[in-house]
Amino acid sequence: MRRTIQFKQTEAGYACFEDEENIFEVCKTDLQFNVKDFYQAFYGEDKDFEDIEIENCIQEDKDANRVYGCIVTLMEKIKEKLAELPEDADLGDEAETE
């Protein structure tokens, strides 16, 4: 099932909204990207990550476009890497043996 995420401006920064809920935000003052929050927003808790569309709702803002571009690029790279994994791979066991 396709998940549609809206990338919008907030008082504090730039955020991704799913069903009007702010699921991930980058603060304007430092543009720091919290990887754990990103993972939880898009991939945590058995979320469907196979088909995610991110709509840029603030195209006129240069900093927002950079943040949006980083999010989209990161998600594309993650999708590529996940597609390379064997379907029967159990990441939990693999992580324990390394």
Image: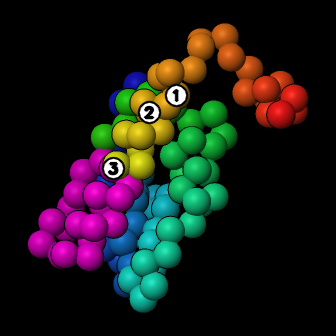
In the current view of this chain or complex, which residue is farthest to the top?
A: 88
Whether the magenta-drawn stretch holds residue 64 is answered as yes
Q: Residue at x 61, y 51 (%)?
A: 40
The residue closer to the viewer here, 23 or 80, is 80
Q: Amino acid at mark 1?
A: Leu
The residue closer to the viewer here, 68 or 98, is 98
Label 3: which secondary element = helix
In the current view of this chain or complex, which residue is farthest to the right?
A: 97
Residue 76: x and y, percent?
A: 37, 40
Residue span colored magenta: 54-72
Could you say which disc has been placed on residue 79 in the image?
Answer: 2
Question: Gap between marks 3 and 1, in whole Å?
Answer: 15 Å
Residue 75: x and y, percent?
A: 41, 44
State the residue position of label 1.
Answer: 82
The residue closer to the viewer here, 71 or 8, is 71
State the residue position of label 3.
Answer: 72
In the current view of this chain or complex, which residue is farthest to the bottom?
A: 29
Residue 13 figure quarter: bottom left
| Image: 65 above or below 1 | below
Given contact means CB atoms under 8 Å apart, are the residues at marks 1 and 2 in contact? yes
Q: Amino acid at mark 3?
A: Val
Q: Residue at x 23, y 66 (%)?
A: 65
- Of the numbered discs 3 and 2, the one sitting upstream in the chain is 3
Q: Amino acid at mark 2?
A: Lys
